Image: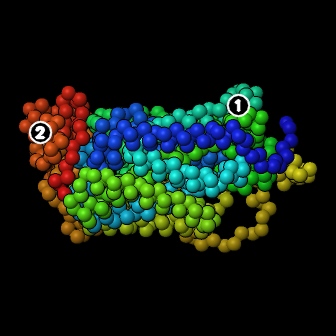
Amino acid sequence: MSKFEKPEIKNFVVWDYVVFAALLTVSAGIGVFFAIKERKNKTSKEFLIGGRQMTCGPVALSLTASFMSAITVLGTPSDVVRFGAYYLFYYIAYTLVIIFSAELFLPVFYRSGITSTYEYLELRFNKVVRIAATLIYIIQTILYTGVVIYAPALALNQVTGFDLWGSVFATGIVCTFYCTLGGLKAVVWSDAFQMVVMFVGFLSVLVEGTIQKGGPSNVWQTAINGSRLDIADFDMDPLRRHTFWTIAVGGTFTWLGIYGVNQSTIQRCISCKTEKHAKMALYLNLVGLYIILACAVFSGLVMYAHFEGCDPLTAGFIKAPDQMMPYLVMNIFSKMPGLPGLFVACAFSGTLSTVAASINALATVTFEDIVKKIFKNISNKKSTWISKGLCVVFGILCTVMAVVASLLGGIIQAAGSIHGMCGGPMLGLFTLGILFPWTNWKGALGGLLTGITLAFWVAIGGFINPPPPSKTLPLLLRTDECTLLNETINATLSTILPTTLITTVPPERSLLADNWYSLSYLYYSAVGCISCVICGLLISFITGHEHGRNIKPLFIRPVCNLVCFWSDKYKKKCWCGVPHDEEVEVELDDATWEKDVTMNSIKEKGIKNPYDKVFTLKPQPGYDAEEKSYTNTEQESRM
């Protein structure tokens, strides 16, 4: 096998910049297109949620692109090289996440006719809970989005020489531009285009990298010889970084907080014209997640085949794991102008889609949960301009946050975990509202604060006191075939594994550091969610639980029907007083009446939706027998 020498940074050539510029131009052009096409639409609803007329296809692509950020494109392959292909277990986690999101959370949000996810919290509890959740979401999303912009730009800059601040500001400006001009429709269709670019970028690396290593069989055999496919680890120790259980269970909690109750996801789902389209978007998105995950994992295996005898991170050729993928690209495409630019376009497609979705979601939440509370009567024209102004404001804030992230150093790693740390308690909060009728607002607020506190405690503690090496040790990483500035590394010191055996005696660690702080990062969301639910229920019973008769059936998902399907008597007992078998009187707005979705027509049509045979006995407002699905309803009068 050939030796590797420490390379100089290979700068982009003209064709690389042309490919990258084409990505930005097309994304911006989509915004201009929808700005012209939708210029007659003057309401904030049409701007923020696409007039609730989207179809499942583009929404599915948008969902996949938004949550497969550049951190995934760069981070997952390097994790496969260092720790093995444990990410394959995410197939289980993703499947569970989509099923729970589509069948448990989405129907409640969709049928409630809400625009902001946190609007549900006021309908179910009160304004205090809604505002608390909204503020937490705004802060953590701005912080996370800043890191999403900066971290990939830094990795690409240090390996490819791609201009750091040029890419940061280009990302912020282009995302803000097409979000402000085209609204949600521009975001969704830009995401769909960027999803295609991500797939093509991954495919180019897979094909060329595999060809250079002699074909798929050689890559696979190299991975087997290097133990990268020895992933049958069913150790239930929660301190282990990656096992079957940490990914299947912890990964489910983490991603359910992102998919099930996150404003960015739910906003695009409720923009679909029927509930059937919204559910189909989630299930089609699952196929997209499968494809991107397969590309990322197999890119990692290809990368390991190239670096089997000379790990660039251990040899000091690069400074961080997320630089491994760009390093590989600049090597295998060194004589192919334009293809490095294609991969950078792939990575930045993940960034653009995530940032655009965040800006749009932040604008929606701020307008619905804060602006409309302060200014009661806003005209359609003013509401649209305010929504666009909020997109500009949050675009600037996210870009500024990226600049701040450059000054934080190691804190970037902790900031990047905040999405998961907040997602768990949020998941617990909505679980309390949707599954437990006796939860009152005091329990909901107390549970949220408890979940946030515990999740931040364990995450920040783990950042300050990293887990012991025995729990996070990477696999064998060789450097015996590297040539570093004409100086061959001593073979006896060429692997990362034995270095842990020759280090000095480690300092004493407290019991808390060796256990609580050493918890796998994938369990942070589980800690926040479970503690929120338990504490919320205890506080509710101590302060006087809510009575089911006072709660509208629309806000509760009676999952007990799945268990007690054989007896209507026991079903009713498990409803805890919530009148699921009664008609729900809800005032609908003019648009809904024009669609002939009336209480009388619903009574006449009856229920034909197969999902509702399981969960409800009576149809809810908005059911369309012809579509066999619920259509969007505006129910602001509930407030």
Precedes in sequence: disc 2 or disc 1 = 1
Q: Which residue carries the number 2 mark?
A: 598
Placement of the C terminus among the 4 image quadrants: bottom left
- Protein image colouring: rainbow
Placement of the N terminus among the 4 image quadrants: top right
x, y percentage for residue 489? Answer: 88, 52
Q: Which residue carries the number 1 mark?
A: 208
Asked if residue 122 can be seen in this view, the reply is: yes
Mark 2 neighbour density, 10 Å: few (under 14) some (14–19) many (20 or more): some
Image quadrant where residue 345 sits: top right
How far apart are the alpha carbons under marks 2 and 1?
Answer: 59 Å
x, y percentage for residue 457? Answer: 49, 68
Residue 36: mark in rendering: none
- Nearer to the camera, 471 or 581: 581
Mark 2: which secondary structure? loop
- Nearer to the camera, 333 or 4: 333
x, y percentage for residue 144? Answer: 50, 58
Disc 2 marks a residue whose amino acid type is: Thr
Image quadrant where residue 210 sits: top right
x, y percentage for residue 189? Answer: 44, 38
Disc 1 marks a residue whose amino acid type is: Glu
In the rendered image of this protein, does residue 222 appear above or below residue 235?
Answer: above
Asked if residue 259 can be seen in this view, the reply is: no
* Residue at (44, 63) in percent of width and height: 139
